Image: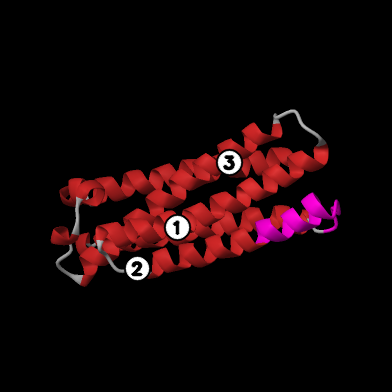
Amino acid sequence: MIDFITATDWTIRALEVLIILYLLVTLNKHRLALFFGGKSNLKSIDDHTMHSCFIAALTVMVFHFVSSSLAQYIITIEMSKLALRQFFYFTMFSCSMAFVIALFFMHNIRGCTFSTTARLCLYLALAQSVVQLIQFIMRGLLDSSMLSPAYSFSVMALNLLSLGVVAIYPAKKFTGLLTKEGI
């Protein structure tokens, strides 16, 4: 099971990088504006959507990489089993909440409205934080592994859903290019 989760984790990472690269290549003329732009680059609803989707995809990729790397590191720390569980699940909860805050503030700093993609990423991150908090209580405080299988499935499913959500915008852009070219 751990090999499957590890393979899924690396697959998600690779697909997230591909989504970011695809957005940068497809939106070539907006590349600098996507990273360094502000309100002056947001002239239409499409511009707001493009920037919001890019921010969501980039934030999902960065936080997924950071939280999975952090999780792998925390597992190697030497401390009592119960304290390690508490530290692990609380850290994962904190990462989910930090993602929500970062996504919100990136939109606020950029001055763009939340796209459907960004909203769905927020909802999924909030769901993940609830799952992390429940597991922190069950496994870290009550020392019960009753929900561990549901926790593992939920985290993997929420990560896959996040990947799917951030892939929707590039997929729409790609199919739009194909229909314009008549392929």
**Position in image of residue 76 (x %, y %):** 70, 29
Q: Secondary structure at mark 2?
A: loop
**Position in image of residue 77 (x %, y %):** 70, 30
**Which circle, 1 or 2, is nearer the viewer?**
1
- Horizontal side of 111 relative to 65 (left or right) equals left
Which residue shows up at 54% across the image and 60% down it? 125
- Horizontal side of 6 relative to 118 (left or right) equals right
Q: CA distance from mark 1 to mark 2?
A: 13 Å
- Amino acid carrying label 3: it is Ser
Question: Do labels 1 and 3 touch, CB within 8 Å?
Answer: no
**Position in image of residue 135 (x %, y %):** 74, 56
Disc 2 packing (10 Å; few <14; some 14–19; many ≥20): many
Q: Quadrant of the N terminus?
A: top right
- Which residue position holds label 1? 101
- Horizontal side of 163 relative to 81 (left or right) equals left
- Which residue position holds label 2? 114
Q: Quadrant of the C terminus?
A: bottom left
Which residue shows up at 44% across the image and 44% down it? 62
Task: Give the mark nearest the N terminus, 1 or 3.
Answer: 3
Instruction: Look at the image and say whether residue 182 sits in the magenta stretch.
Output: no
Disc 3 packing (10 Å; few <14; some 14–19; many ≥20): some
Q: CA distance from mark 1 to mark 3?
A: 18 Å
Task: Give the mark nearest the N terminus, 3 or 2.
Answer: 3
Q: Quadrant of residue 150?
A: bottom right
Q: Secondary structure at mark 1?
A: helix
Which residue shows up at 45% across the image and 51% down it? 60
Task: Give the mark nearest the N terminus, 1 or 2.
Answer: 1
| Magenta stretch in the rendered image | 131-146
Q: Is residue 183 visible?
A: no
